[in-house]
Amino acid sequence: MVMAGNGRTLGALLTAFLFLSLLPLPTSAQGVVGSISLECSEDPDINVKPGEYQDEVVECTVTNDGTLIAESIDITEEWDGVYVNMAISEDSFTLDAGESADFTVTFSCDERTDAEIEYEFTITATVTAWGPIPVEGTPLSSVANHTGDVTIKEYGMVTLDMPDTSSRNMQTSEEISITFQVDNDGNAPDTIEIRITNANELEQLGFVLQSGDFLRASDVQSGGVSEQLEFIIRAPSEAQSEIRNLIVVEASSTLDSSKDIVDFDLIVEAEVDSAGLGAGLSEVSTDDLALYGAIGGGVLLVLFLLIIIGRVSKRSSKKRSAKETPSEPVIEIDDDDDLDFDLDFDDDEFPEDDLDSMLDDL
């Protein structure tokens, strides 16, 4: 059986050589019978970022470079990928002399695949027959290869982990510490930058950024967390009224445009002291003070007149009562001792009250 198979192969080769000997020889190697070429696009770099993932496709073209006879061509691949899949759209062609055909190679994997994964691949085009004559496995079979690498694109995804995002109440000149960490949720080591994006606005209000407005967490591993970081902020030294303003903290990846933002209020209480009281009084105009003084003086004068009128009325009533009372007759007591008591009093003995004496009583 082996001898018979070898005989058929040898017969096919002899027939092929006899057929070729009858054809005119080409003037260049490009037209050699059985020659092929294979060209492919750039190597794939797969974007595995959640929400942005898509398969990566390599486009290839295989060409029968001969000028005399059709060729049967098989497409195969060499691939040892574990986390990445590779699929060829078509694996065989029959091309006339000078004819080309396109096919695609698709690479796919899971989202969040680690960027350190990298595989080499080889795509091979092999001539299996010249027309009806099989030549696979013989010196008459031409081969074309394309070798490349499939890589995973790095992406950033950061989380600004700040436990306390409530408003911070401060006294004038008080310092507070804003502590936080940053998480690297991307697929590669990342240097994460943290900044207070509205630092200029805060400084114009009198806040002092003791720690500066920029920090950097270097080489945070994929899936890792940075060390604890902090911004130190001092409140304005003066606050005639309450100061309230947002502070905006942003963490951003250096791998791409990924970022995370946290904001909350900084509240500085107004100062309450004598200076503050004077400042409040200064808001009252001179005309208002004069008006209030005139009103107060008028009220006091009215009260004073009422008291005087009340006193005068009381004394007048007492005097009228004394004059209208009839004089009692003198009581004479006959006694051995002949005592005589005269209880009649003359009103003239008392001076008449006037306004001056009443004012003296007041």
Image (cartoon, helix red, strand yellow):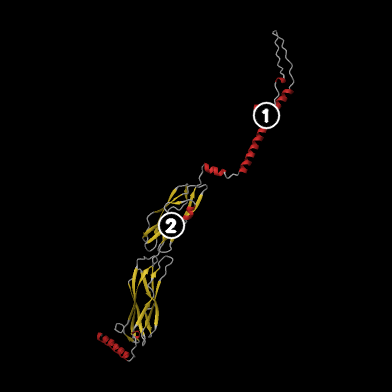
**Residue 97 x, y percent position in the rendering:** 37, 86
- Residue 57: x and y in percent read 40, 73
Tell me the element at label 1. Answer: helix
Q: Quadrant of residue 88?
A: bottom left
**Cα distance between the residues tagged 2 and 1:** 81 Å
Q: Residue at x 66, y 28 (%)?
A: 359
Q: Residue 105: x percent and y percent?
A: 38, 75
For the residues labelled 2 and 1, say whether their Cβ atoms are less than 8 Å apart: no
Name the residue that disc number 2 marks: 195
Q: Quarter of the image containing the N terminus?
A: bottom left
Q: Tell whether 288 sits left or right of 335.
A: left
Which quarter of the picture shows residue 312?
top right
Residue ID for mark 1: 311
Badge nearest the viewer, 2 or 1: 2
Q: Badge 2 local density, few (<14 within 10 Å), some, or many (20+)?
A: some
Q: Quadrant of residue 161?
A: bottom left
